[in-house]
Image (spheres, rainbow, N blue to C red):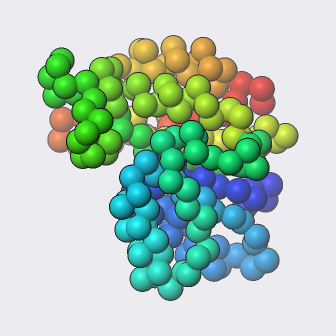
Amino acid sequence: FENINYILDMGTGTGIIPILLLYLLKKIPKCNLKIYASDILEEVLTCAKNNENLNGFNSKIHYIHSNLFKSFPNSLKNLFDIIIFNPPYLPPINEYNFRDLSNKKDFCWNGGKWGIEIFKEFLNEVREFLNLTHECYIYYISSSRGNQKKLNNLIEEKRFKNQVLEKKHIFFEDIILNRLIPSDF
C-alpha cells in the first residue's frame, strides 16, 4: 500500500469492497489509508453503512451520495490513488428500454444502449479526481455483452491504457476485470 493514501469504491452497492479493504488494513500496521464509497442510491448507502457496522468497523468508510462524481466536493479532486468501479455494463433488454430513470433496479445493471454509456460518463469525469502525481489505477468490470470495440476506442480517446487482468465465462457472458492506467505514465 505504498503511495496509496486514498481509495474510492464507485457504485459501492453493499459496501463489500471497502469492508474487505478494512479487513486487509487490520493486518498492515501504521497504514493511514482513507476509504471512500459512493453510490447513486441513498438506500444502498444505508445498506453499506449497516454492513460496515455489522462487521465491527464504525465510521471508517467515508460515504458520498452521488451520481458518479456530480456531488463530490472540490476537496476530493486530484486525490484518489485507486478507484474501483463495477458499473452497470449490460445493454438494455430491448431497443426501447435504454435506461428507465424511474426504475431504480435499472441503475444496477443497465449500462445504456451499448452497455458502456455509464462508463463513458465516468471516464469523462474521473481524471480530475485521480492523483496524477504518481501512478494511479482504475479497476473496473466489463462484459462481453457490451460493445468492446466502442469501449476500447473510448478508453484510448480518454488517454488511458487498458489491461485485462482476468476473464471468466458465466452464463451468457464473459465478465472481465480490467485495470486502467492514465497514458501519462
Of all residues shown, which one is farthest toward the bottom? 56
Q: Is residue 15 left or right of residue 123?
A: left
Residue 79: x and y in percent read: 75, 48
Which residue is depicted at the point 62% across and 35% down?
A: 126
- Image x and y of residue 147, in percent: 35, 19
Q: Is residue 90 visible?
A: no
Q: Which residue shows up at 41% across the image and 74% down it?
A: 51
Q: On the image, which quarter does residue 33 sit in? A: bottom right
Q: Tell how many labels.
A: 0
Residue 92 shows up from this direction: yes
Where's residue 73, x and y in %? 68, 48
Task: Give the left or right position of residue 124, taking residue 41 as reference.
Answer: right
* Figure quadrant of residue 160: top right
Q: Quadrant of the N terminus?
A: bottom right
Q: In the rendered image, which quarter contains the C terminus? A: top right
Task: Please determine whether, in this image, residue 59 is positioned above or below residue 94.
Answer: below
Image coords of residue 10 (percent x, y): 51, 48
Give above or below for 81 relative to 184: below
Q: Specify whether 138 is left or right of 46.
A: right
Residue drawn 64% across the image and 55% down it: 7
Which residue is more in the foreground, 25 or 62? 62
Q: Between 1 and 168, which is closer to the camera in this rendering?
A: 1
Query: Residue at (75%, 59%) from the top-left corner?
Result: 5
